[in-house]
Amino acid sequence: MSISKKGCILFFFLAGVALTAMIFCLTAAGQERLLDKKNSLRTNSLLFIPRTTLLAVGDSLTQGTRDATNNQYHLQNAYLQRVASKLSLVLPLKFSQAWLDVNGNRLNPLTVPTNLGVDGEDIFSVEGYEYYKRAGSSSNYISSEYLCDKLQPYFFTDMHDKVLYPINILAGKPVSQIDALIWHLNNRTGPAIVIFWVGNNDAALSTLGLGGKNPQYFPIPFDQIKDQLKPVVSYLLNYGKSKGVIAFDPYTAAHIEHNLTDTSDFSTQLNRLVTRINLNRTGVKYFFLTYPYYQEVGYLMGNEDLEFYLSKLGYSIPESFKGRVSLLTFFCLYALAKEGEVSRIPLILGNDGLVMSGDESLTIKNRIDSFNAIISMLNGRPNVHLVPTGDKLNKAFSSGLQVNGYTLTRNWGRGSSFSLDGVHPGHTVHAHIANILLDEINKALGLNAPLWDLASVLASDPYFDFDGDGWVAGPNLPASGRTKILYLFKDSQEGIPGPAVIDTMTPGEVWSLISDALLEEILGISLIRAEAERIGIVPLKK
């Protein structure tokens, strides 16, 4: 009897799936036996108290992003790992991370993660949906980008695959973060603590002026730097602009509104999520974290910030400049000033599309207030606890976080609160967030988990400006994409007031690196990739 080609393919595919599942089950079973044996001694001494599972649904803050990258080093120093470390001292805890290496590859693909946080997640993508406004669509739609749907690790294509695998195998279907959380809650053997911190990114793109779809925004002064970039990069950026897939004017009232989630949409989606999660589960405590003012991050730089850095190169910012520009725009300003092209700077600062005004900032702030009002309505429900992270971080960034005689502020670099990307906190602020959450968990559950000593964390924080020159050392890790641009501004000799890496390079070297980094970024846009393949810049995909 003959078998068709399709039949052969289907047979081997199913055989591969079965083999993968069998291997996984055997490996997982072995790991579980070892874990059970390891924990038996501990549970004996604790009167057989079942382990509490620590689960988290979140975005880049929960995953542990810094410098626009994710890896084991960053996750180890992020708030959730710090919370888990302290909680494990006072109760038997089940907690696991999806560890990534420095290249972003999953290190432990057979381990079932309980930190489900994925970089970039908003209130819709956490359930697998693309939000219609930001996607330029007429309605929300399911996107495979927001689902873990690969059967084997070598098929991973996005961060959801890397973080949520193998929960999709265990659930028998592609899973979003919410699907993965529900699977955990349905299959737990003891109590659970659920951390929910999703919603920051519903205001993020409006603040960052970076990312999105149809178009994808890049807050760079393209018209003023296009002759400095490599010709092919300038061509591709201009091509993308002409086709409507790239835009360089994110800070207009219309574009800010385009990237903000509508209040009514946020409310409807949050209600949908909590209904699916079921807040009435016995033995589960839910901690919902409120949102800080995203538009106050160090990524946005005003008159004082620009004056501090550009005056190093002999350029003084006009006092009349009242807006704020993105970190990427600032980097271009610094590179131009370093080269002596200061005549271009007023043109950039006068470009409304590159400058966030006070009114535009207020629009974002008011929307975040509405998000917080909506999530605060959950307070008082059984098993729900509200964590005032928003208010406490806003206070820390406005009046300064006092640590061991130092004052950490919102200012990029010299403020020592943020990583080099100006958005994600450094080690010390992550420890501060952990303390805010630990304090609420202690009160809600009657625990006495110790808090972190921020002074000891600060002592080894690579994002703290110890010599006061405005530059920080940053971590000693490889870089790709926009992280290459960020690393231009690492302190070349932290501890001694002096230059950043960019100050030790020639203008040609600087623009070459910026060009290469931008090329890496835009090749992720399908239309740009196709054009790059057509003109022979990158090889055709097979």
Image (cartoon, rainbow, N blue to C red):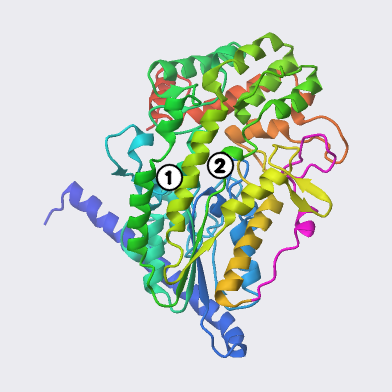
Q: From the viewer's perspective, is residue 297 above or below residue 356? A: below
Q: How crowded is mark 1: few (under 14 residues within 10 Å), some or many (20 or more)?
A: few
User: What element does badge 1 sit on?
Assistant: loop
Q: Looking at the image, which residue is at 45% across and 19% down?
A: 536
Residue 120 appears in view: no
Amino acid on which disc 2 is placed: Tyr
- Image spot of residue 447 (x, y percent): 61, 77
Q: Mark 2 points at which residue?
A: 294
Is residue 213 covered in magenta?
no
Q: In this view, does 234 lie to the left or right of 539?
A: right
Amino acid on which disc 1 is placed: Thr
Q: Quadrant of the N terminus?
A: bottom left
Q: Looking at the image, which residue is at 64% across and 68% down?
A: 85
Q: Residues within 10 Å of mark 2 (few under 14, many from 20)?
A: many
Report the Cα–Cα distance between label 1 and label 2.
29 Å
- Contact? badges 1 and 2 (CB < 8 Å): no
- Image spot of residue 19 (x, y percent): 35, 64
Q: Which mark is residue 157?
A: 1
Q: In this view, does 539 lie to the left or right of 336?
A: left
User: What element does badge 2 sit on?
Assistant: helix
The outermost residue toward the right is 496
